[in-house]
Amino acid sequence: MNRRLSHPAAVVALAFLAAIGVGTAVLMLQWAAADGASAGLLTALFTATSAVCVTGLVVVDTGTYWSNFGQVSILVLFQLGGFGMMASATLLGLVVNRQLRLSSRLVLQAETHSLALGDVRSIAKLILAVTLAVESLATAALMLRFALGHDMPWGQSLWHGLFHAVSAFNNAGFSTWGDSVMRIAIAADGWVLGPLMLAIVIGGLGFPVLHELVLRRNARARPSMHTVLTLWGSAALLAGGALIILLAESGNPRTLGPMDWGERALSASFASLSARTAGFNAVDIGALTTESLALHYVLMFIGGGSAGTAGGVKVTTFFLLLLIVWNEIRGHRDVEFRGRRIDSAVQRQALTILVLSSGVVVIAMLALLPMTTLPLEKVLFEVISAFATGGLSTGITAELPAAGQVILVLLMFVGRVGVVTLAAALALNHGRRGYRYPEEKPIVG
């Protein structure tokens, strides 16, 4: 038991669980709620889980239900959750001890997907530098826009700018307004959506990609396959999603219909980006067409880059599976990409993550449907959003029964921690047996 609990993957899961427990206790304090009454256990647990797992689903309005202390607590929770429990602990250890023990390096390697133990220290420092830089710049940009463009008092502008900047970079989806950024980004305000999108993209790429882009000194060096798949895959999903949303919603009078074409393009791009990871919405999600909702299912399930603040099964997992299919169709014995062969163990990891993730979504949906009379498309949307830590909602979260909200809590935890833990466990669990069974080929298809 001690050996299992000391496994880096288990340490990551337990750290997130401990943070959720502490966050729940803090949010249950009387001064965390705006009315001075202690929040219920389920409300505090749901909010803390959503914050630590950087999801953004809520059962109460963040800006009105929680006091200033409560909102600051929520901000701290999704900052820790996006930054990473073990990354935070590792940086603290560097400050105190100036060095990292091997066990700490193994745990951080599991959480950040570092390619080697030598990368751990530099990645930890890069995480801190990028986080502070992006959040500071986004806060400044949003504060100026809120104050100068929307006549908001400077104090409120600073707070709302800071909250949304940190939420965007951590892909948390929390907002101090009940309708997310719809009211402040009316008519597709590019000075609001632009900084948010930039923060979302940088946080959602994943720290290994940022590490390679920032610290790779030789510009002619060949980029890693992971970086190429993440960058090109993210760009393809963003462009393709924006195009489909633009076509599906241009005639919808409740979403993009009243806007001009420039505003439609910006809002569609923001919706496509936010659907994969961020959880903000500049248009009413409940008013989307069936085609757009179906697209959101796919984008949310895929998510963003590995070892970052995004959720989902990850971009690299999705495009790696496409490469497996493409090479199989072409009759190649190996899965190849850009002159490189992809290891069979990595292929099995991708397939395992896809199958288990799909199974979790299906089981949760089947468990949730008998509890409510809400439409299937909205229940499925909520389930995928919770598991993929997307944070978007059609507005039914608070309408679900207590048991349904508990299911969403479990989904958020499994989606944020379970997939990461599974990937780390698979990567670190390479046992070799001294024998192989005879081969047999069952019929497929």
Image (cartoon, rainbow, N blue to C red):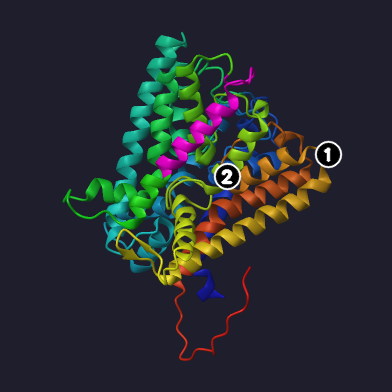
Task: Residue under label 2, please give it.
Answer: 298
Residue range (magenta): 234-256
In the foreground, 354 or 411? 354
Q: If you read the primary sequence from the N terminus, does the residue marked by circle 2 or circle 1 appear first?
A: 2
- Majority SS type along the magenta span: helix
Magenta-drawn stretch contains 383: no
Looking at the rendering, in which quadrant would you find the C terminus? Answer: bottom right
Camera-near label (2 vs 1) is 2
- When the figure is inspected, residue 120 is found, relative to residue 150, above or below; the finding is below
- Marks counted in the figure total 2
Q: Residues within 10 Å of mark 1 (few under 14, many from 20)?
A: few
Q: Residues within 10 Å of mark 2 (few under 14, many from 20)?
A: some
Q: Quadrant of residue 439?
A: bottom right
Residue 56, horizontal then vertical, whole percent:
58, 37
Task: Residue under label 1, please give it.
Answer: 373
- When the figure is inspected, residue 312 is found, relative to residue 143, above or below; the finding is below
